[in-house]
Amino acid sequence: MIQTDSFESIREEFNTASLDKKVQLYVSAEGLTQDQYKDLLKMFPVNELHRLENALQ
């Protein structure tokens, strides 16, 4: 499990990142809880979820 302050820095970077960077951050993040992954997903554009799905395959 990742520390809360580390997750907050990931979350802040994710929030301001380009779409490509968001995909990269999401797929490369390790040690996040299910709730932390869900929190990041809430900030991901719904109409671009296919890009994230493709990166995860």
Image: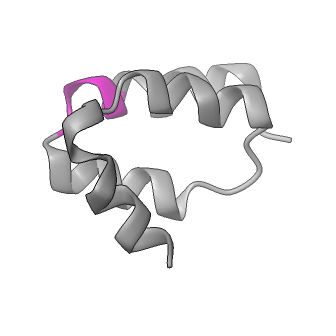
On-image quarter of the N terminus: top right
Q: Position of residue 33 (x, y in %)?
A: 79, 37
| Quadrant housing residue 32 | top right
Q: Image height check: is 6 above or below 8?
A: below
The residue shown at (48%, 34%) is: 10
Left/right of residue 21 with respect to residue 18 in the rendered view: right
Give the colouring mode of the picture.
one colour
Is 18 on the left or on the right of 28, as rendered? left
Which secondary structure class fits the magenta region best?
Answer: helix
Relative vertical location of residue 36 with respect to residue 18 in this rendering, above or below = above
Q: Over which residues does the magenta segment extend?
A: 13-17
Q: Nearer the viewer, residue 49 or 18?
A: 49
Most extreme residue toward the bottom, as rendered?
Answer: 57
- Residue 20 lies, with reference to residue 35, above or below; the image says below
Q: Is residue 15 magenta?
A: yes
Extreme left residue here? 18
Q: Quadrant of residue 15?
A: top left
Of all residues, the one furthest to the right in this rendering is 1
Magenta-colored stretch includes residue 51: no
- The residue that appears at 32% across and 47% down in the rendered structure is 49
56 versus 26 height, above or below: below
Residue 31, position as x, y percentages in the image: 77, 50
Give the side of residue 37 with respect to residue 41, left or right: right
- Residue 3 at x, y = what percent? 77, 30
Residue at 47 percent across and 32 percent down: it is: 41
How many circles with numbers are drawn on the protein? 0
Residue at the image point whose x is 22% and y is 45% from the top: 48
**Residue 26 x/y as whole percent:** 47, 51
The residue nearer to you, when weighing 3 against 39, is 39
Between 54 and 32, which is closer to the camera in this rendering? 54
